[in-house]
Amino acid sequence: MDTHTPITIDRKSTETDRQIALRQIYTQVLERQPYEFERKEIAKLEKDFLKGKLGVRHFIGELVMSSVYLKSFYRDCSNLKFVEWSFKHLLGRAIQGHEEIAKYMDLLMMKGVSAFFYEILGSEEYRKAFGCFTIPYARDVKFYDSPRNYLQTDLLQHEHVGQRGKVIPTIYWQQLGMDCETGTCVMPDSETSQHYAYQDVAEKAKVKEPVSKVLNEEIEDLLQMLQNSDARQVLQSMNENQRSLLRNLAK
């Protein structure tokens, strides 16, 4: 999983520090730098941040409510895909389980986008992970309480907007075994006509699958062992490959 050293900006930070932080915020939240025409809309917001009038959390709260963000991740997208992207950008993880999905989907549909973002940015999880001055980031594998949560987040962190469409969220296409790499999700089809239509896509996927798949399976096994057993017993039962993986994850 892609991670980076957390960037924290406070009242003592220089304008140069804030320029660097601004680029990182856009990379995390927009997955790119704003286009020139978009910068006109957020020009005052940028200026206030660079002058130290806004903290990181406040700036992000204004950014996600702008049309710059909403055009990319809300309009023309399913509500659940929007929720999934918002969790990726603001909490550094995939949404977890049906209870959390139901909570945030209801909030979004009943009270709107503003209340939805207020709930995330004001949550105890956000406060403990990032506070007011740290830019959100993909959190370390040790954060996840289950292998599935880790794997879903890992898939999401490597996804770019539009790569797997704007309708079906990662939590579902991955579980259903759908092919979404081209931006349009399709179910596996054994018929000859469909087979040839998607053969090229499948072959491309095979090229990059083995290494990440094997690594994720090893991490999943390790997380499962650590979660369900006494730590001392787990260490005694590990083979050398698992011990090596554990050392690498602990770095």
Image (cartoon, grey):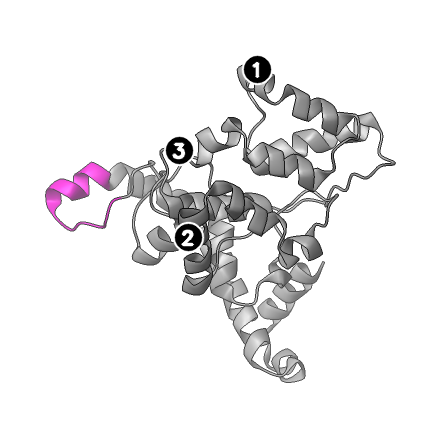
Q: Residue at x 61, y 34 (%)?
A: 62
- Image x and y of residue 104, in percent: 46, 54
CB atoms of marks 2 and 1 within 8 Å: no
- Image x and y of residue 49, in percent: 73, 29
The C terminus lies in quadrant: bottom right
Q: Please, what is the three-letter code of the amino acid marked with disc 3?
A: Arg
CA–CA distance in space, label 2 to label 3: 16 Å
Residue linked to disc 3: 75
Q: Is residue 154 visible?
A: yes
- Judge from the rendering whether residue 239 lies leftward or rightward of residue 95; answer left or right: right
Q: Please, what is the three-letter code of the amino acid marked with disc 1?
A: Glu
Res. 159 mark:
none
Judging from the image, what secondary structure is the residue with disc 3 in? loop
Q: Which residue is drawn at 69% across and 62% down?
A: 250
Q: Nearer the viewer, residue 217 or 57?
A: 57
Q: Which of 238 and 115 is in front in this view?
A: 115
Judging from the image, what secondary structure is the residue with disc 1 in? helix
> Which callout, 1 or 3, points at the residue further toward the start of the chain?
1
Residue linked to disc 2: 105
Judging from the image, what secondary structure is the residue with disc 2 in? helix
Residue 193 highlighted magenta (yes or no): yes
- Judge from the rendering whether residue 162 lies leftward or rightward of residue 240; answer left or right: left
Q: Which of 161 and 60 is in front in this view?
A: 60
Q: In this view, does 55 lie above or below 46?
A: below
Q: What stretch is highlighted in magenta?
A: 186-198
CA–CA distance in space, label 2 to label 1: 33 Å
- Image x and y of residue 222, in percent: 56, 69
> Which callout, 2 or 1, points at the residue further toward the start of the chain?
1
Residue linked to disc 1: 36
> Which callout, 2 or 3, points at the residue further toward the start of the chain?
3
Foreground mark, 2 or 1? Answer: 2
